[in-house]
Amino acid sequence: MTALSGSRILITTDAIGGVWTYSGTLARALTRRGVHVLLVTLGPAPTEPQLAELRKLPNVEVEITDFALEWMDPQGDDVERTRRGLAKIAQRANPDIVHLNSYREALCHWPSPVLVMAHSCVRSWWLACRGEQPTEAHWLTYISYVEAALAAADMWIAPSKAFRDNIQLLYAPSQPGHVIHNGIDTTPRVLSKESFVLAAGRLWDEAKNVATLLAAADNIEWPLKLAGSGRLSGSASRVNVEALGDVPRGELLSLMGRAPIFVAPAVYEPFGLSVLEAAAAGCALILSDIPTFRELWSDAAMFVEPRNASQLADALQRVCGDAPRRAELQRAAILRAARYSAAIMLDGHCQAYERLLGNASADISCRQRDLAEMYA
């Protein structure tokens, strides 16, 4: 047991993307150290399969709400209802620490030290995907909430140094952010490799750069299997692309085990859990040359210019046709993935939590409450 044994941690989460995987992994790891976890979901409700994974865990409760996710409610129509609802939950749960996986909830009236995990943000997404900052009034409101929330939090962290630096540049928070890499605890099995290329991600998300991937797929020998929610425009005519739709996580991990190559040409990625899971499953990685991927996978992947379909196709074709090079990349990916384990992630979070608890007796939360009242 640790100094956190017996502590109660309230963690907000959502069921849409990697935040759910991250939150479940962290909750599972925390219970092994005697921590009681309350996961509070925001946004669309999790599915029964998602909930089934958590119901098996001791000392983990899940409270489902319909409070709007901030990027789905940038103008803040649901802020007051969310604030009142979360205050009631906190009063009932009496957490020792509040861990938020979004920003503006830091402006609620929390009774405990608040940690914000910066998984992503619309402002940085917009810059990476569209080369400019958003100017619509509702997104400017969103940006003001993020800025205030980072100032209100007792601590904020990011999953990569590249993204931490990006957030600091865009929002200039009063205190520096800490970096704790994401980690996984369910290592996909390395199965008998077949002859296909795998990609995974939300097809509707510009950040995933699906258009470049589809253009490259027309010029490679192996078929491309693409897992993710959304529809592919013009995909019916692409005989080399199989759109799998939204694949349950267990099936996706099995696909990764059979895939010899995983490709991610993202133009924006604060971490990339799917890349980590694919690496652990023994996939050779072909990634876009962006700061996050360089930080995490340098010397363990092949890098290409994000929007260069010709270069991406050449890289894919080379790795498809060169078994020794493919095996070399697969070994490098497996070795590098070991750096990003759930145990290492847990150690980083526990150090952060213990620091928050150590400072709780001081007046560290006054700043957070004062700022919250400014936006009440």
Image (spheres, helix red, strand yellow):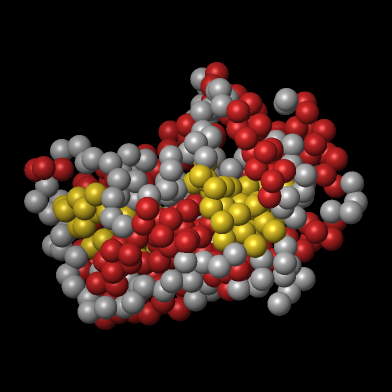
As drawn, 251 above or below 124:
below
Do we see residue 21 in this rendering? yes
The residue positioned farthest toward the right in the image shown: 362
**Residue at position x 41%, y 74% in the image:** 187
* Location of residue 145 in the rendering, given as x and y in whole percent from the top left corner: 64, 31
Q: Identify which residue is drawn at 20% across, 57% down.
A: 224
Using residue 178 as the reference point, say whether residue 111 is left or right of it.
right
Task: Tell me where residue 277 sits by quadrant.
Answer: bottom left
Residue 25 location (% of width, % of height) = 51, 64
Q: Nearer the viewer, residue 245 or 44?
A: 44
| Residue 195 shown left or right of residue 360 in the figure | left
Quarter of the picture holding the N terminus:
bottom right
Q: Pick out the residue farthest to the front.
A: 92
- Given residues 22 and 198, the one toward you in this image is 22
Quarter of the image with the C terminus is top right
Residue 143 visible (yes or no): no
Location of residue 200 by image quarter? bottom left
Answer with left or right where residue 61 lies relative to residue 356.
left
